[in-house]
Amino acid sequence: MNTVIYYFSGTGNSLTTARMIADGLGDTRLVSIASKKDCLSISENAERVGFVFPIYYGNMPYSVRELISKTVFKPDAFIFSVCTYRGHSGDIALRMDQLLRTRGRTLSLSLGLPMPGNSFINAPEVDQEHLKNQKANVLSIIEKIELGEKEDYYSKKVLLSTPVDIASNFRGIKADDNCTGCGLCAMICPRNNIKIEDGRAQMGEDCVSCLACFHWCSREAIYMSKQENIARRKKYHHPDIDVQDMILQKYDTEE
């Protein structure tokens, strides 16, 4: 069955997961959601369509919502989602299903796996255990997808709004005096939301809270000015991902 996986990733958790799933399924295209930001519409003819992304505030990143809202799917497509999360997956199955119903489709299967978080923090030993178990968890996910397992996620439940329903810099992400204006954060940002002005990074409001700029800044100059408890938390990225992987997400180079 020909498959496409659309992925979104700020620290590499979902990128590595998407790659593992694609390798396990075979005959699978990997498409970066960031690379489709400026597309007005997308016609997806794959028989099996997957979305791999991190959970933010119990919800999907705005970029995922934006892409699904402009995609036309095959009438009989098997649509699955795989989320990476620090604590739990929230109501993501219901949110995905409700969104897909606006496109005339439904969610076939929702799966997930625990990984280190990009904002709030687990104990180091917990994060190490999540990384250690990633491959085994993904193998289990691949098996369920290959079997074509389905669930009915239909619900009339009114889901509460979350801070990531829209794009906005609600965390107050900004650069301090340690910023040298190198431009790396601007190259990584999946929304092209960062400009270098007067030798310093300036963040706009088209922010989806991926925190790629925060975690990949070599000067540790970027912080969350409106979230004191995690404003300058320890930086993290998946050990199998480098900065070039993050930059290339904007150009849809993987197949």
Image: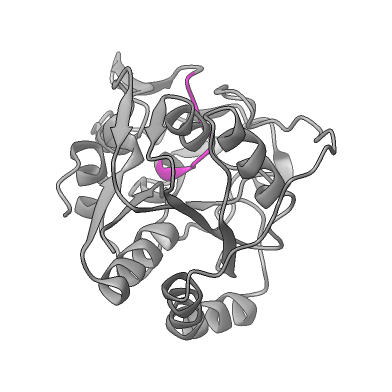
The extreme front residue here reads 76
Whole-percent x, y for residue 71 in the image: 40, 30
Q: Which quadrant of the rendered structure holds the N terminus?
A: bottom left
Whole-percent x, y for residue 87 in the image: 70, 63
Q: Residue drawn at (19%, 45%), measured in percent from left and top?
A: 248
Whole-percent x, y for residue 14 in the image: 43, 58
Residue 224 appears anywhere in the view: no
Q: Tell me how many marks there are.
A: 0
The extreme top residue here reads 198
Whole-percent x, y for residue 165 in the image: 64, 28
Q: In the rendered structure, which segment of residues is drawn in magenta? A: 206-212
The extreme right residue here reads 157
Of 111 and 1, nearer the camera is 1
Q: Is residue 140 above or below residue 6?
A: below
Of 84 and 240, nearer the camera is 84
Magenta stretch: dominant secondary structure? loop
User: By what rule are the colours in the image chosen?
Assistant: one colour
Image-based side of 157 in relation to 89, left or right:
right
Q: Is residue 208 magenta?
A: yes
Image-based side of 230 in relation to 68, left or right:
right
Q: Residue drawn at (46%, 33%), measured in percent from left and top?
A: 68
Q: Which quadrant of the rendered structure holds the C terminus?
A: bottom left
